[in-house]
Image (spheres, grey):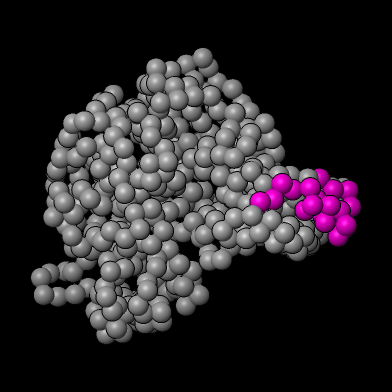
Amino acid sequence: MPRLSADARHTVRLEINGRAMEGEAEPRMLLTDFLRHKLGLTGTHVGCEHGVCGACTIQIDGAPARACLTLAVQADGASIRTVEGLAPEPGRLSVLQEAFRRHHALQCGFCTAGILMSLDWYLREQPDPSEAELREFLSGHICRCTGYVPIVAAALDAARRLREEQRSEP
Amino acid sequence: MKPAPFDYVRAGILAEAHDVLAAEGGDAAVLAGGQSLVPLLSMRMARPKVLLDIMHLAELGGIRIENDAIRVGARARQADLLAWSGLAKHQPLLAQAVPWIGHWQTRARGTVCGSVALADPSAELPLCLLALGGEVTLSSKQGQRRVKADDFFTGLMSTARSDDELIEAASFPCRRPGEGFAFREFARRHGDFAIVACAAVVTEKNVRLAIGGVADRPVVRDFDDPGDDALAAFAADLDARDDLHATADYRRDLVRRLGRITIDEAQACRA
């Protein structure tokens, strides 16, 4: 049973977007700060830091989660996806990201990374959501710019395109 | 906003967890999903010396039927319970109530027993545990004991758990033939803390209404005849308080109105 002492830094190893990564963290370091300051992955944003706004949402072991409600040491050994892992290659956006651009589903962009990571998971779980289901799902995120209408439109559009993509695959 | 320093222990087996709690007592905090504890740490409302992570204890996983109850192990997440295939069949009240807890993104991490342990007066799971007459299994180096929900919730975010104990499981009784259930909640936005939450369990002879979000803990009352007067008397007896979100009077009014709707729904689904 390893006991990690409060006043030392400890090596945290995890898989991020398919790559093994590691960094040093005190037990009290939040995963948000670990991703941004230790690993340089600044795509994950820090908003309220108490789990309400949704800006820091990432995927931990295949499920959406608030990075600000997770300690870095808790995530040791976990598999994590962040917004940096969404685009299939440099210079190309994912279907969901492309839909956000097309529908102007972001203005300042602060909430966007979290919403993308939530929707990326949700559209795989529920490929054909109703608008009401999407709105309920998005209640876990706060956006102060868009009024949500273009976000919902982008999600519905992305869901449709992803279903078509699925069908046309041999 | 950063937590004060603490040691972190990831226990691999239950005996290790018991040792830490026996040695550290009230200076240790049990970490499960962390959806309530981590913000309390970040705001420094909780300043434990040691954080005991129980999410790697093989012994405490799983959701299963045991003694006519759904036994939810300490590691089971709220999303696990919602996704458990027997939920709507074995306990419709939980199937109705769990979607009200926070959001998808927090239910994916938050545990059922963690919510029971925190005993927030507006939380859904303590309310359901009380309404159904469930129980909590606690254990320490001294052994295991079971505590009825009635005796477990002792006040505002306080429970009968001793400092050296951890919750192994919460057991929610399965539906029995002839029972009807309903759950209703009012909050400003979905996922916010409930201003008032109502759970009703009705049988042929009895109507039980449990109320969360009003007093310092969930409160339950059984009625022979749940008429408007009886409901109003229950609302008046509740130790309601004013806060930023609602006045005590507003909460009592919600208990009368939402309580009525909840009871009627439970009776309709029993029939």
Identify the residue shown where x is 15% and y is 40%: A24
Foreground pick, A166 / B79: B79
Q: Position of residue A102 (x, y in %)?
A: 27, 85
Q: Position of residue A57 (x, y in %)?
A: 32, 59
Residue B231 falls inside the magenta stretch: yes
Foreground pick, B222 / B4: B4
Corner quadrant of residue B184: bottom right
Identify the residue shown where x is 31% and y is 84%: A103
Q: In the rendered view, tell whether residue B30 sits above or below residue B22.
A: below
Foreground pick, B188 / A21: B188
**Name of the residue lying farthest toward the left:** A90
Residue B271 falls inside the magenta stretch: no
Identify the residue shown where x is 22% and y is 66%: A86
Corner quadrant of residue A158: bottom left
Identify the residue shown where x is 36% and y is 61%: A54
Corner quadrant of residue B131: top right
Please give the range of residues in magenta. Answer: B222-241
Q: Position of residue B205 (x, y in %)?
A: 87, 47
